[in-house]
Image: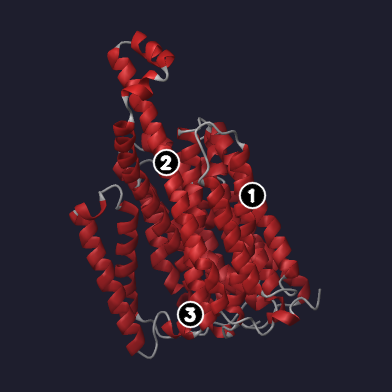
Amino acid sequence: MTSSEPAAEPNRAMIVASVMLAAFMPLLDTTVANVVLPQMQGSLSATRETISWVLTSYIVASAVMMPMVAWAAARVGRRRLFLGAIVIFTIASMLCGLAANLGQMIVFRLLQGASGAILVPLSQAIILDAYPRERHGQMMAIWGAGIMIGPILGPTLGGWLADVADWRWVFYINLPVGILAFLSTSAFLEKDKPNPRRFDLAGFIYLVIGLGALQLMLDRGELKDWFHSYEILIEAAIAASGLWMFAVHAMTVRTSLIDLHIFLDRNYAIGSVMALVLGFVLVAVAALLPTMMQTLLDYPTLTSGILIAPRGVGTMLAMIIAGRTLHLVDARSYATFGLLLISLSLYQMTKFDLYMDSWPLIYSGFIQGIGMGLSYAALTTISFSTLAPEMRADGAAISSLMRNLGSSIGVSLLIAFLSRNTQINHAEIAESISAGVLQSDAGMIERNLALGFSGAAELLNAELTRQALMISYLNNFKLMMFITLAAAPLAYLMDRPATAKAEFTAE
């Protein structure tokens, strides 16, 4: 089977299940390690600054490897590359669990990130090639479900494993999944012939420097106080220079590592921008909510993970609906409606308070999940509807890169805003407290004074910090709401897929 011929009907379902299982591992690992960092810090004798390299190394390796996926697949063949990536990722996961010190952990996380970056875009390209174009909408809805569910379930699974076992099981959990994915993929994914093309060494160097420096800047910016740090200034300058040199190089050579002419396809170009926005919101919310629930609402780690689960349920439900109905409606309408639902859920989240029960978390998360599922399924279908088959590997790699960049930018910026706004809000609330306000709750003051002046002051300061932090979370939700609202109309700048009316006729 060539890379553009649909697979035989009996094998299609097993191909989809196999490659989705493999791609689920790195997607889960984008967030699953976050919740066990405190345990890892103590076990590996690391500091707050150095333990962050566990996340940074994975993100940087993934960003650097993704643009090479299309070239590597053409060089050795998709099947061989995909199976090799499964093996490396599974072994690297085992080694992460066995790591005795931080240095070993960083090296093994680099291997995880590099191999995981291959699995996600190749799984998309393989599924697209396994089905004829009129089935792509349905299959991208199924593929998108896995893409969205992985980061959402990460905190839940990580919290549960940390409670019932040990942080090392966050990595060991990949072993049975990786073995099963390798066996099923090797059994059902047919061999393809390599079609080698020249390796663009100069472009690779420029891109590695640019993307590596950009990801380092985004990941370490808050820790280093952003542009008040020489490290961040240097990384920003290197990132801008490297990416500019790559863009100039790619437009002036015959064979580039990434064919930037893919962005001349309007559907794909706009879809890539919107993938960045979805990545921004998806992972940023997944990163902010568990921390908010644990620090401000006093939920245990496992409970906070369970309360995030309705997002995943909503996403799965929306993906099923989209897969079966995209042929009945304009996919652009689904994309816009989905983004509006996300905006609505974020508006509901701006109404959170310190004394609410769990219900607002549940229904806002469910609505957000539905919006994520509808918009992602529709946008993926439209973005790839006009790409030539030989461009799908490039397209899938760039789309994954844009989504990951959006995630990195979102998490970095929103955590920075959270920290700074908390300080500002704390100062403003403290200034607004007058003697009359304090006298309005004489009982509280009497109880505090019974603890002594210093105890009363500490309690008051702690409450001010809680209020200031909550306001900062709400401001972040409001910012994401406006960004999502601004992106919603962009879907109508895309052309409706010519095959949309014919989709799913076989169903």
What numbered label is drawn on residue 471? 2
Tag 3, which secondary structure?
helix
The residue shown at (49%, 33%) is: 354
Which is nearer the eye, 21 or 435? 435
The image quadrant of residue 23 is bottom right
The first of marks 3 and 1 along the sequence is 3
Residue in front for this viewpoint, 8 or 347: 347
Q: Nearer the viewer, residue 469 or 53?
A: 469
* Real-space CA distance between mark 1 and mark 2, rounded to the nearest whole angstrom: 23 Å
Percent coordinates x, y for residue 97 in the rendering: 47, 44
Q: CA distance from mark 3 to mark 1?
A: 43 Å
* Residue at position x 34%, y 34% in the image: 429
Label 2: which secondary element: helix
Where does label 3 land, which residue? 75
Total labels drawn: 3
Q: Is residue 425 left or right of residue 283?
A: left
The percent coordinates of residue 306 (x first, y second) are 61, 40
Rate crowding at label 1 as few (under 14), some (14 to 19) or many (20 or more) other CA atoms within 10 Å.
many
Residue lying at 53% horizontally and 56% vertically, measured from the top left: 27
Does any portion of residue 97 appear in the rendered image?
no
